[in-house]
Amino acid sequence: MRADLERRALGYGDAERTLAVKAGAALWEAAFRGLEVTGAPMLTPQLLAHAGRMLALRREALFVLDVRAGRLHLLPAGWWNVYGRSLDPREWIYQVDLGSPSGTLTRRVAGAGVAHAVLTPARGEPWRAVPITRDAALWAAIEDALRQETRFKRAKLLGVDSGTAAPSREDLGEMLSDGGIVVLPGESTRAGLPNQVQAARIGVADIRPDPADGLVTTRVQARDELLAAMGVPRELITGATGPAAREAYRRFAALAIEPAARVLAQALSTALETGVTLSTAALMAADVPARARALKGLKDAGLSLAEAREVARI
């Protein structure tokens, strides 16, 4: 209950439902689902996708170690709080929310019983991250403003020269709220009524959503900044093709996914007390031709084969 109230207070729920956040998180989920796991057979593609989404949005992911029928399982945490006065993370206490078909279960688990990967720690507080959803709250507010604009039903004003009196503003508002075609007498063009009404002197005028240009521009800028904060090049969202799309994919895999995978692997290795690796080799398969060309160029420039392979990461 406390965690749910905190989520609402910080606006996480609304932010995570916006299109930009969904698109960016979906890319992280897909990339993590394709990681090659060594040393942690219980880490399924579904759990990897969950970790990818959490690292994309919250910049941290938490799994609770759970032993059932003699087998170790990883339970994905939806929300958690950390307590403790010790400097040893294994002695901290985690209050964790775990999902179940009938609701949320809350457990208190020692730090030694969790795998906690923190991608971007808060300054001076290594037990928590700075979530991207705080910045995404601005995007959510912009989306809500645009949604309010588009809720206005489209209508057509049909002006006729009847010589009768114009409706009041209140009556006109009620007439337009239902949409469709609204017939107005010619006197409706008198001063004080909206421009669209004045345009319908004799003829038809459209009444439709008309969001401010500044709001639309701000939405695009906020989207690009939000995606950049998530490590997602905008070209992967806007449908770019050719070299631009390939370069964007390389940047995403090498600069966002690979470092995050290393952080998660380190957290799992510490918790499971065994070496865990998460390889992005499968994600880089599409980049092999470009790396081969880079290898040849480096060799032609005078580097040895070993040096060229190290630089080209082959």
Image: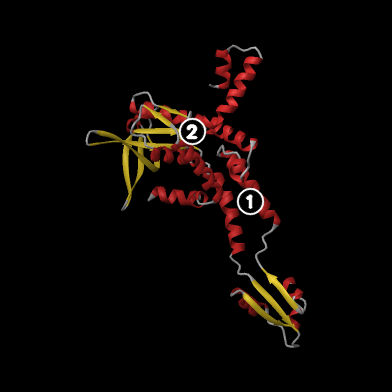
Q: Residues within 10 Å of mark 1 (few under 14, many from 20)?
A: some
Residue 81 visible in the displayed image:
no
Where residue 303 appears, as percent x and y from the top left, is 62, 12
Quarter location, residue 89: top left
Q: Of residues 91 and 147, which is closer to you in this image?
A: 147
Name the residue at 57% across, 35% down: 249
Amino acid carrying label 2: it is: Leu
Task: Report the side of 182 relative to 123 (left or right).
Answer: right
Tell me if residue 193 comes above or below residue 95 in the rendering. below
Q: How many marks?
A: 2
Tell me if residue 191 comes above or below residue 79 in the rendering. below
Residue 75 disc label: none
Where residue 109 appears, as percent x and y from the top left, is 32, 37
Labels 2 and 1: the sequence-earlier one: 2
Where residue 120 appears, as percent x and y from the top left, is 51, 33
Q: Of residues 87 and 175, which is closer to you in this image?
A: 175
Q: Secondary structure at mark 1?
A: helix
Tell me if residue 266 comes above or below residue 45 in the rendering. above
Where residue 211 appears, as percent x and y from the top left, is 67, 60
Pointer 2 residue: 119
Q: CA distance from mark 2 to mark 1?
A: 27 Å
Q: Residues within 10 Å of mark 2 (few under 14, many from 20)?
A: many
Amino acid carrying label 1: it is: Arg
Q: Secondary structure at mark 2?
A: loop
Task: Report the side of 163 relative to 181 (left or right).
Answer: right
Task: Report the side of 70 relative to 273 (left or right).
Answer: left
Pointer 1 residue: 219
